[in-house]
Amino acid sequence: MQSKNMEDDGLIAAAERLNAGAPIPTIEPSQVEHVWEALSRIPMESRKNSAVGLTAVCGDAEYAPKNADEQVALMTRFVLLDALLERAF
């Protein structure tokens, strides 16, 4: 099991790669779908006023990100999907 610092370093490095122009890493659509379904069960007020981590909704190991790149990809793709849908309504 990685230490918290190593996890944070991995997330920072993955975000920096993305910010430098690297493509968003590929993840399974089922991962995004699982997170979307789990978060949609949480009232909007709670999602806006508290930090809801992806680990809180990825209890099923099948859908959990396997590394920092996958975690950043999942977060990024979720935020993009959310923003697109919000603008459509």
Image (tube, rainbow, N blue to C red):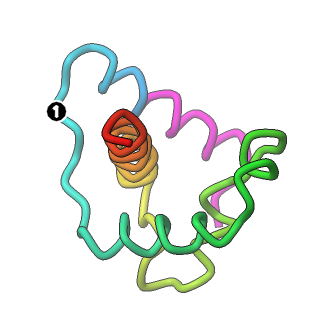
What secondary structure is found at the residue carrying circle 1?
loop
Q: For the C terminus, give its image quadrant.
A: top left
Corner quadrant of residue 33: bottom left
Determine the main secondary structure of the stretch shown in magenta: helix
User: Residue 83, position in %: x, y?
Assistant: 40, 36
Corner quadrant of residue 57: bottom right
Q: Is residue 38 above or below residue 23?
A: below
Residue shown at 60% from the left, 64% from the top: 39
Q: Residue furthest top?
A: 20
Is residue 72 magenta-colored?
A: no
In the displayed structure image, the side of residue 72 where residue 25 appears, left or right: left
Q: Is residue 49 above or below residue 3?
A: above
In this rendered view, identify the residue nearer to me: 66 or 24: 24
Q: Residue furthest front?
A: 89
In this rendered view, identify the residue nearer to me: 63 or 78: 78
User: Residue 35, position in %: x, y?
Assistant: 49, 67
Q: For the N terminus, give its image quadrant.
A: bottom right
In the displayed structure image, the side of residue 33 where residue 11 appears, left or right: right
Q: Amino acid at mark 1?
A: Pro
Residue shown at 83% from the left, 40% from the top: 49
User: Residue 41, position in %: x, y?
Assistant: 65, 72
Magenta-colored span: 1-13
Residue shown at 25% from the left, 61% from the top: 27
User: What residue is pinned by disc 1?
Assistant: 23
Residue shown at 34% from the left, 46% from the top: 81
In this rendered view, identify the residue nearer to me: 12 or 39: 39
Q: Is residue 62 above or below residue 52?
A: below
In this rendered view, identify the residue nearer to me: 51 or 18: 51
User: Residue 73, position in %: x, y?
Assistant: 34, 46
